[in-house]
């Protein structure tokens, strides 16, 4: 018997999961906040009907919204409880349980999306491997889109760019928000778009 894959997300017991995680976004949406900024940006960067991998999909908020807009979406996540919530909401979509750094995935995608701080929650030291695995899944001309909080001593844009370059990708855009707010060095959030070199 092998141990279940671990990550900085699965090792935490102080974060909401499943329905409790979804409730935060439901409450925001009910108050009038647009909770689909990630989907808006992704949809603006890829062709209609594009194949998209939501890497670190959680409860499926981004994947389900993209599917509703006509994209062919697959979700992948390490947390079975989060995936259970995604499957309950959208059983028609393909959901894969696994580690982003090691799980084999069939086919290629026009875009791979790492939203919701995914890269700062993967197992420590696997960030470059995750970026490389995501790059491997890109179709020719595909796009890797990653957004996360920039934390002192943690993963930053320079390390992301280095991992992307090692995987054969180059930086196309960098913003400070999902709605294309400007990025400033030293900012606390970044959204980067990389494509094959």
Image (spheres, rainbow, N blue to C red):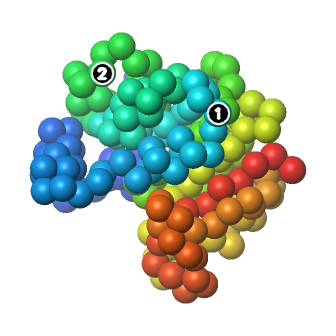
Q: State the image quarter where residue 113 is shown.
A: top right
Q: Nearer the viewer, mark 1 or mark 2?
A: 1
Viewer-proximal residue among 134 and 197: 197
Which residue corresponds to the image point at 65% horizontal and 56% vertical from the top-left?
Answer: 193
What secondary structure is found at the residue carrying circle 1? loop
Tell me the residue that label 2 is attached to: 90
Residue 162 position, x and y percent, is 75, 64
Q: Position of residue 24 (x, y in %)?
A: 17, 52
Q: Are marks 1 and 2 in contact (CB under 8 Å)?
A: no
Q: Secondary structure at mark 2?
A: loop
Q: What residue does disc 1 label? A: 47
Residue at position x 53%, y 41% from top? Answer: 43
Residue 101 lies in what quarter of the image?
Answer: top right
- Name the one closer to the observer, 186 or 51: 51
Q: Earlier in the sequence, mark 1 or mark 2?
A: 1
Q: Quadrant of the N terminus?
A: top left
For disc 2, the neighbor class at 10 Å (few under 14, some 14 to 19, many from 20) is: some
From what the image shows, is residue 145 above or below residue 62?
A: below
Asked if residue 3 can be seen in this view, the reply is: no
Residue 171: give x, y in percent of width and height: 74, 61
Q: Is residue 97 left or right of residue 80?
A: right
Q: In which image quadrant can residue 140 be found?
A: top right
At x 63%, y 39%, the residue is 46
Q: Residues under labels 1 and 2: Cα distance?
A: 23 Å
Query: Residue at the location (44% across, 18% down)?
Result: 94
């Amino acid at each position: 018997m092998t141990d279940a894959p671990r990550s900085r997300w699965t090792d935490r017991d102080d974060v909401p999961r499943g329905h409790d995680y979804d409730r935060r976004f439901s409450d925001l949406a009910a108050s009038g906040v647009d909770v689909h900024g990630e989907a808006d940006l992704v949809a603006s960067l890829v062709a209609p009907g594009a194949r998209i991998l939501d890497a670190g999909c959680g409860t499926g908020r981004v994947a389900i919204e993209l599917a509703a807009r006509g994209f062919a979406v697959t979700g992948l996540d390490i947390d079975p409880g989060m995936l259970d919530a995604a499957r309950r909401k959208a059983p028609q979509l393909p959901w894969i349980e696994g580690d982003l750094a090691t799980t084999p995935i069939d086919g290629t995608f026009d875009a791979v999306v790492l939203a919701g701080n995914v890269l700062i929650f993967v197992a420590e030291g696997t960030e470059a491997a995750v970026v490389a695995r995501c790059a491997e899944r890109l179709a020719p001309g595909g796009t890797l889109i990653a957004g996360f909080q920039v934390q002192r001593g943690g993963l930053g844009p320079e390390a992301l760019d280095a991992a992307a370059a090692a995987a054969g990708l180059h930086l196309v855009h960098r913003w400070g928000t999902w709605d294309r707010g400007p990025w400033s060095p030293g900012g606390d959030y970044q959204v980067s778009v990389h494509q094959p070199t």
